[in-house]
């Protein structure tokens, strides 16, 4: 195996590990976004392909100049970090370009039902991520404990089920007592394929409560 081929295989393995445990690879969510972008550029270079633009990646319309964490901060607070959300967006991108292998793809005959239920259910009562797995089967890709990704076989946009996670800030824990990370997080939001962030966002009761605490919503 020549060095370029070996480096490509090494980067692809690193991408998979990085997206599964994003908090291990960057302190800040924006740093993780930069790291993902650099890895994508490296892989495209090794494949002798041009760098994709933000427009080609589908990032400009959804996240604008504030980066991927921006709309999440405006929706749910800037005291949290959004490593998993950044990783989910790039998981879809890396998969689209052939640099990430999923555990499964949702068959064409199952996808419409999943899309419909994800868009309309879970708004009235709190739901845990284990209940999502019970309803729809194992995810295509799982990011830590907090986020489930479902990818369709037809190559259209993914669905993301975002669990709520607690992340202390850079200076330690919040004033309230930190009781540990939940083994089975409560669902905070669902992100569907859509033209922009708001169009695809669905909030659970927890997500709606977190959003009401913010001074302004993303627009």
Image: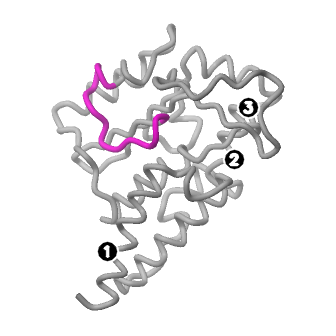
Q: Which residue is mark 2?
A: 70
Helix, strand or loop at label 2? It is helix
Compared with 198, 210 (above or below) is above
Give coordinates of residue 183: x percent, y percent. Answer: 47, 25
Q: Quadrant of the C terminus?
A: top right
Q: Earlier in the sequence, mark 3 or mark 1?
A: 1
Query: Quadrant of residue 178 in the image?
Result: top right
Q: Earlier in the sequence, mark 2 or mark 1?
A: 1
* Foreground label between 2 and 3: 2
User: Is 141 contained in the magenta span?
Assistant: yes
Helix, strand or loop at label 3? It is loop
Residue at 36%, 68% in the rendered image = 12
| Segment tinted magenta in the rendering | 133-146
| Mark 3 surroundings within 10 Å by alpha-carbon count, few (fewer than 14), some (14 through 19), many (20 or more) | some
Give coordinates of residue 118: x percent, y percent. Answer: 39, 25
Q: CA distance from mark 2 to mark 3?
A: 11 Å
User: Is 179 contained in the magenta span?
Assistant: no
Q: CA distance from mark 3 to mark 1?
A: 41 Å
Relative horizontal placement of residue 20, taking residue 72 as reference (left or right)? left
* Foreground label between 2 and 1: 1
Asked whether 175 or 126 is in front, the reply is 175
| Mark 2 surroundings within 10 Å by alpha-carbon count, few (fewer than 14), some (14 through 19), many (20 or more) | some
Query: Quadrant of residue 64 in the image?
Result: bottom right
């Amino acid at each position: 195996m020549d060095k370029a081929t070996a480096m490509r295989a090494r980067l692809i393995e690193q991408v998979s590990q990085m997206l599964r445990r994003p908090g291990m690879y960057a302190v800040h969510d924006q740093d993780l976004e930069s790291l993902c972008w650099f890895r994508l550029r490296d892989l495209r270079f090794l494949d002798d392909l041009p760098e994709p633009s933000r427009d080609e990646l589908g990032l400009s319309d959804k996240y604008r100049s504030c980066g991927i964490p921006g709309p999440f901060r405006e929706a749910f607070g800037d005291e949290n970090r959004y490593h998993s959300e950044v990783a989910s967006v790039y998981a879809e991108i890396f998969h689209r370009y052939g640099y990430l292998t999923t555990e499964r793809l949702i068959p064409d005959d199952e996808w419409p039902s999943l899309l419909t239920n994800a868009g309309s259910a879970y708004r009235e009562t709190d739901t845990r991520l284990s209940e999502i797995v019970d309803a729809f089967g194992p995810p295509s890709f799982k990011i830590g404990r907090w986020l489930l990704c479902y990818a369709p076989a037809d190559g259209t946009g993914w669905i993301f089920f975002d669990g709520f996670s607690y992340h202390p800030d850079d200076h330690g824990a919040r004033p309230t007592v930190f009781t540990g990370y939940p083994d089975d997080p409560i669902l905070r939001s669902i992100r569907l394929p859509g033209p922009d962030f708001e169009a695809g966002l669905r909030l659970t009761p927890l997500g709606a409560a977190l959003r009401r605490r913010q001074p302004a919503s993303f627009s």
